[in-house]
Amino acid sequence: GVFMSEKISVGILGATGIVGQNYINLLKNHPWFKVTYLAASPNSAGKTYEEAVSGRWHMKDDIPAEIKKIIVEDANDVNKAKGQCTVLFSAVDLDKKLIAELELSYAENGFAVISNNSAHRFTPDVPMIIPEINHNHTALIDIQRKNRGWKTGLIAVKSNCSIQSYMSPLYALIEAGYPVKKMFVTTLQALSGAGYPGPSGLDVLDNVIPYIKGEEEKSENEPLKILGHIKDGTVANANLPLITAHCNRVPVIHGHTACVSLEFQNDKPDLDEIISIWSNFKSLPQKMLLPSAPERPIIYHYESNRPQPQKDRDTDKAMAVSVGRLRTCNLMDIRFVGLHHNTIRGAAGGCILSAELLKVQGYLGERV
Ligand code: NAP
């Protein structure tokens, strides 16, 4: 047969949570990665994975047979992971300071840590990556390794899920020569974004909660790092756009929606041109045919009542951003609606795509 190189062994910290379960589901038949190590809180440690998630397995497919009997370890014990895997997806939910320390200690011990958590998003030598946008920020890993004396260890993070419904549409316009000056965004964020069990049914059904702790600040600040460029060993943030965000929790299970108005800095493209820019947008993950990359990162819907979470969140392995309702804005230049799957594109799938990018760029240790 064909030559098959050995798969990279990966572990999941927080394997029992909503995001952790998505990793297990998405990595099931992955061509490059194989799940060999699972860790969660001390409550789950010592149990088989099947026992640890008993009564709270949320995926439609069953737990993969090869995962069921793996003994879950304590994610706080770095030594347990040694020799078990080389890459770690971090999706633990803990105090930020503890997560920051924990992820550092895994990286110090030689693991490539790819994190869903916000703890290191603004650490100066840590890249915050959306692979279609700032794939070149992975060069910070060379600086990180030099700064810290790491050989195989690294930390790379993804952005908050709230911003992913508009970041690629925004970036596609900027890249096409239409820089954006101001952006006004209202998010309608799904319940699964709060982890399991999340807010109580009595609080959220028949309701909208107009506050998600820390979310507006993340939505306003993280885009500027992602749109920034590497300079003097760190990322010099972009100055624009100036963003104002209203973040709401709504009774949708999966899929974050964002209603966006924006104002261009100079020229304004017309609406047809914008749709064509979005529909033709492709980036490195598409060119390199990364296994988790959506074929078309941005899908424009012409129907006046789309995108909708129920209908559009699963498009192209739940990795595409769906947009629609592009029209002129009475206050700014244009407005539109964006949608993405928060636990896949916005969490586990997004980090797996980053890991694929890091692999082809030679950062995952196998190419010395
Ligand atoms: P979750 O469902 O509440 O799962 C939390 C995970 O962390 C579980 O595996 C849990 O293990 C583990 N954990 C809890 N306390 C721990 C401790 N003291 N030590 C070690 N592990 C501990 O949360 P989630 O929604 O999957 O979120 C996980 C991370 O991803 C969070 O940092 C979150 O901010 C981020 N994130 C989530 C989303 C989303 O859409 N849900 C999107 C982007 C980012 P046990 O089962 O043993 O308690």
Image (tube, rainbow, N blue to C red):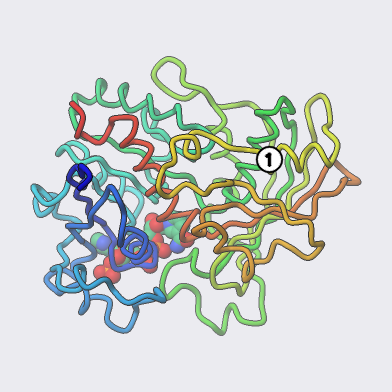
Residue 88, x across and y down, in percent: 25, 48
Query: Does the beta carbon of the residue at mark 1 sit less than 8 Å from ligand 1?
Result: no
**Residue 363: quadrant of the picture:** top left
Up the image or down, 311 lies above or below 1; here it is below
Q: Residue furthest front?
A: 1
Q: Which residue sits at x=35%, y=47%?
A: 115
Number of marks drawn: 1
Residue 5, x across and y down, in percent: 19, 42
Task: Check disc 1: other Cα within 10 Å, few if <14, some if 14-19, many if 20+.
Answer: some
Nearest to the observer: residue 37 or residue 6 = 6
Where's the C terminus, which quadrant? top left
Residue 224, x across and y down, in percent: 58, 33
Q: Which residue is mark 1?
A: 243
User: Which amino acid lies under the numbered mark 1 shown in the image of this protein?
Assistant: Ile
Q: Is residue 166 left or right of residue 325?
A: left
Quadrant of the displayed image that contains ligand 1: bottom left
Nearest to the observer: residue 131 or residue 196 = 131
Is residue 286 visible to us here?
A: yes
Residue 139, x across and y down, in percent: 38, 24
Q: Which residue sits at x=17%, y=57%?
A: 36
Q: Residue furthest right?
A: 330
Q: Which residue sits at x=58%, y=46%?
A: 297
